[in-house]
Image (tube, rainbow, N blue to C red):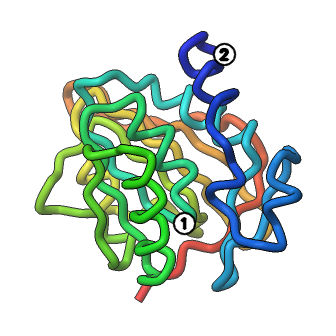
Amino acid sequence: MDEKLLQFFSSLDRSRFVDEPYKALSSLDRPLPIGHGQTISQPSLVAYMTEQLELNKKHAVLEIGTGSGYQSAFLAEFSGELYTVERIGELSKKAEERLSSLGYRNIHYRVADGSLGWPEHAPFDRIMVTAAPKNIPKPLIDQLAPEGIMIIPVGPEGWQELLKVTKDRHGSVSERKLLDVAFVELVRK
């Protein structure tokens, strides 16, 4: 793992991103409930997915599934601007409060259907999807910039493949399986 990412991973207090009674479990490397049938991913997977995006401070990043804001903190730390979309208004509001209290000012929030992306700010250099659709939504591929990278779990509920989707400078898209994973379903309107 990249040294800066490792330092950030070690310093970010995950307990700030979960409510009682789960705070006591926040140091475990496992997913935890955050309400509304959603989860916060295990820390090692969040760090791995972040590393796979190959971020730099010039990148505009789209995140689908703000959740608790834990993954958002990683993305905001290592990119220029983060545009994060959450379907559940209460989760988005709590995440915004948490991330603002940590000093992040490069995050833009939206409550909407994440499968549609955020076309007004496209294209995005990087896209992180933290809930699993059965297939990659076409709007997300369309909103990925040339030479962009998207990390997305794809497959039926409960068991998916984590894919690294890349678009070359000519617009050709390819995908590579990274891991078998289990994410909550990406719910569309």
Left or right, residue 189 beside residue 14 = left
Relative depth, front residue between 9 and 111: 9
Q: Dot 2 corresponds to which residue? A: 1
Q: With respect to residue 5, does 67 lie above or below?
A: below
Relative depth, front residue between 142 and 79: 79
At mark 2, the secondary structure is loop
Q: Is residue 27 visible?
A: yes
Q: Dot 1 corresponds to which residue? A: 67
Where residue 26 sits in the image (x, y, percent)?
80, 53
Q: Residue furthest top?
A: 3
Answer with the quarter of the image where residue 56 lies.
top left
Q: CA distance from mark 1 to mark 2?
A: 24 Å
Nearer the N terminus, badge 1 or badge 2? 2
Answer with the quarter of the image where residue 84 lies.
bottom left
Residue displayed at 34% across by 77% down: 111
Q: Residue furthest left?
A: 120
Q: Is residue 144 visible?
A: no
Q: With respect to residue 112, does 63 lie above or below?
A: above
